[in-house]
Image (cartoon, helix red, strand yellow):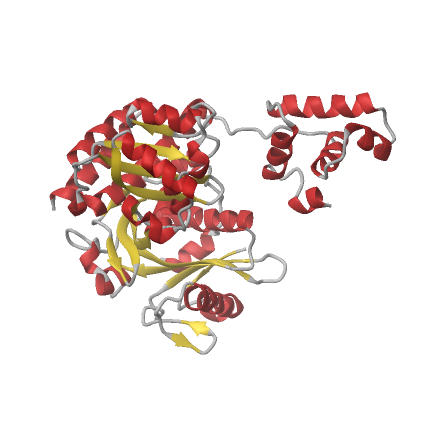
Amino acid sequence: MLNYVNASNVSKHESAIDGMFRDRKRVFVDILKWNVPVEGPYERDQFDDDCAEYFIITDSSGGQHQGSMRILHTDRPHILGSLFPMLCADDVPSGPEYRELTRLCLSPALRARERLQVRNRLFTSLVEYALMTGIKGYTGVAAMNWYQQLLSLGWRCTPLGLPQEVDGDVIAALLAHVEPNTINLFRQAGTYATGNMHVAEIAQAA
Amino acid sequence: MPQLSDVTRFVELTNAAKTLNDLGRLMADITREMSFDVYALVQHVDIRRSSNDGNVWLENYPSCWAEAFVARGLYTSDPIHVASQKKTAGFLWSEVGAIIRLTAHHHRVLDEARKEGLADGFTVPAHLPGEGNGTCSFGVKTGRPVPTANLMMAQLIGTFAFESAQKIIARQKNVPVEKPKLTQRQLDCLVLVARGKTDWEIASILGVKEATVTDYITDACARYNVRRRVQLVMRAVHDGHMTLRDAIG
C-alpha cells in the first residue's frame, strides 16, 4: 500500500512512519555506515521536520515498511542546498516547482525482485504526484551506483555538476525532469508501476 | 565549467541518438575531447552473443586486441572487469592491483593489452539490479598519460553513455522479451539434469522411456536456443523456472 504522509496526516500513519525511521537506521547507519544523526532506533535528521513529506510503501497484509522516500521543498533548507551546494556548477535549482528526493530506503528484508518492484512503485508514484501538482523536477544527491539506477528509471536527467569524492564516496547531483511524456519513458524503460495514489491524498498535499 | 557543459551537450546528443552506431560516434568524439584515445562500452552478459540480442558491445579499441579479447575468451577473467564488480565508481587501471588480488592470468591479460598498445585507462562500472552489470572504459595508448584532470568528467560520461545504450536497445526491441516457457515434465527432467542424472537415470526415476527424456530436454534446449544442457540449466535458474536449491537437491 502506498502512503502519502505529511505533518497534517502523520497521526493516521504512525506505524508506517515508525517502520520507515527504523529501516532508515538499519540501512543508512547499520549497513551503509553513513554519518547521520540517530535517535534511539531511528535515523532522523534536521530535515525531518513539519515540512517534510514522505511516500511510504507498506506490506498490504502486515503493514510492514517496504520502501520510502523523503520529499523536501527546495525553497527551504534541504540536502543539496544546505549540505552539498558545491555539487552544483551553477545555482542550486530551487523554488515551488522543484522538490528534492532524499533518503530512498528499501527494506533490507526484501528480496532482489521485490526491491525493484517497490523502487519502481515509489518512483512511478512520485512522477504521478508531480504531474498532478505541477512539480517540474526532482533534484537529488547520489553515489554513482544510485545515480546510474536513477537514470535507468527512464526519465530525462540533467547533471548539475561533476561528481566529487566526499568521505570516500563519489557523489554527484542531478535533476530529473517530470514532463508530460515521463510516464511513457518509464513504460519504455520497463519501470512503470503505478502506486495507486488516491486523489484524496493529493488534495492533502496541496 | 566547460567540462560540465560538454557533458550536458553529450547527454542531449545521446538523447537524440537512434542507434548504437550513433552512440558509438558520439563516444569516439567525446573520448578524444577528454584526451583519451579509445573507449569500450560493454554490458557483461555473455558478450559473444551479438549486440542485437539486447546486450551492449560498443568500442573502438585496436581491432587486434578486441578480437583476441573475445575470440580467446580473455574477458572471462579480465581483471578490469573483475575489479569493476567491487567498485561503485570509476577507477584507474593502474589501481587494479589494490582492488583485487591479481592472478598470473590477470597479469597476462594486462601484459597482452599493453603489448597491443593499451597501457592505461579509467573504467566506470555500471551496476543495474536485474540488468547485470557493465563497464565504460576509456584507454590511452602506450606512452600517453591518462588525463587525470578529466576523470570526473569521464565518470559522468560513462554513466550517461551506459544509460543511453540501454534506452536505445529497449526502443529497438520495443517488445518485452518473453521468457521461454517450459512444461512441467521438462522441468522435472531439468531438475534431475541439474543434479547430474543421466537420461537413463531420469527415465527410471520418472517412469518414462529414456528416449522421451532425451526428447524433453532437446526440446527445452531448442526453446532456449542453446546447445548444451549446462546452458539450459543456467538459463532456467536465471529465469526463475527453478531455484538453485532445486538444482542442488
Q: Nearer the viewer, residue A11 or B111?
A: B111
Q: Where in the figure is residue A121, as x and y percent of width and height? A: 48, 48
Would you identify the image quadrant in which residue B69 lies? top left
- Drawn side of residue B142 relative to residue B207, left or right: left
Residue A182 seen in the figure? no
In the displayed orientation, state which residue is furthest to the left.
B2
Residue found 43% across the figure and 43% down from its top: B128
Q: Nearer the viewer, residue A194 or A78?
A: A78
- For image coordinates 29% across by 39% down, the residue present is B158
> Relative to the observer, which residue lies in front, B182 or A198?
B182
In the displayed orientation, state which residue is furthest to the front: B104
Can you say whether A77 is above or below B232 in the image? below
Q: How many marks?
A: 0
Whether A49 is drawn above or below A58: the answer is below
Which one is in front, B168 or A179?
A: B168
The x and y percentages for residue B135 are 36, 39
Left or right, B15 with respect to B168, comes to left
Question: Residue B232, can we see it?
Answer: yes
Q: Is residue A194 left or right of residue A34?
A: right
> Residue B221: percent from the left, percent from the top?
65, 24
Q: If the image is split into quadrants, where does the C terminus of chain B sit? A: top right
